Amino acid sequence: MKKILVIHGPNLNLLGEREPGVYGTDTFESINNEIIAHAVKYGFNCEVFQSNHEGEIIDTLHLARKKYDGVILNAGAYTHYSYAIRDAIAAIKIPVIEVHLSNIHARDEFRNKSVIAPVCKGQISGFGKYSYLMAVDALYYNWKESDVNE
Ligand code: DQA
């Protein structure tokens, strides 16, 4: 059974009350329940972690490399400037899917740049909570494709 870890970065614990016009009104808890339910449809085991601290996100990526088969990461604002998180992703072999609820390319200029994108398997941005569900799909198809190629 594939094991996936969803990592939410800073301020995402406030989903539901944080800038609802941008991020929607679904709560952090309900979004996590939807992600887990979607992962279960593929037979994946799915766990969720959230931190407002860069170092904790890095530590969790390091731990994930031995415990999980793939990671779904919304690094929040760290996306745009954390070379340390970028290096942590580059250091591990499991696929990391970058996720954003909002379309980071259609917002403030500083959000247009993702320093983690080049070391992630791919990026899903702009579909609200469905970005996370699509990232679960992405991992499924990624693994399906690699089975075919093996
Ligand atoms: C975000 C986009 C980031 O620019 C922002 O700092 C966030 C959330 C998103 O999910 O749309 O915290 O990653």
Image (spheres, rainbow, N blue to C red):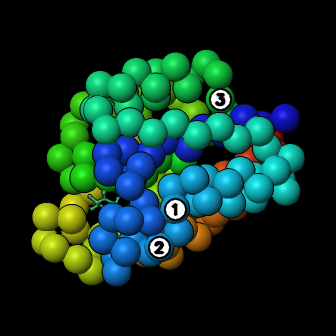
Where 127 falls versus 1 (above or below)? below
Image coordinates of residue 48 in percent, x first then y, are 58, 40
Residue reaching furthest front? Answer: 17
Q: Nearer the viewer, mark 3 or mark 1?
A: 1
Q: Residue at x 29, y 32 (%)?
A: 53
Cβ atoms at labels 1 and 2 below 8 Å apart = yes
Query: Which comes sooner in the sequence, label 3 or label 1?
Result: 1
Q: Quadrant of residue 131?
A: bottom right
Q: Residue 112 got which mark?
A: none
Q: Amino acid at mark 1?
A: Thr
Q: Residue at x 25, y 52 (%)?
A: 77
Q: CA distance from mark 3 to mark 2?
A: 30 Å
Where 102 falls versus 118 (above or below)? below
Q: Is residue 130 left or right of residue 12?
A: right
State the SS at label 1.
Answer: loop
Q: Residue 27 got which mark?
A: 1
Cβ atoms at labels 3 and 2 below 8 Å apart = no
Quickly name the residue at label 2: 25
Q: Residue at x 84, y 35 (%)?
A: 1
Indicate yes or no: mark 1 CB to ligand 1 under 8 Å: no
State the SS at label 3.
Answer: loop
Quickly name the residue at label 3: 68
Q: Number of numbered discs present? A: 3
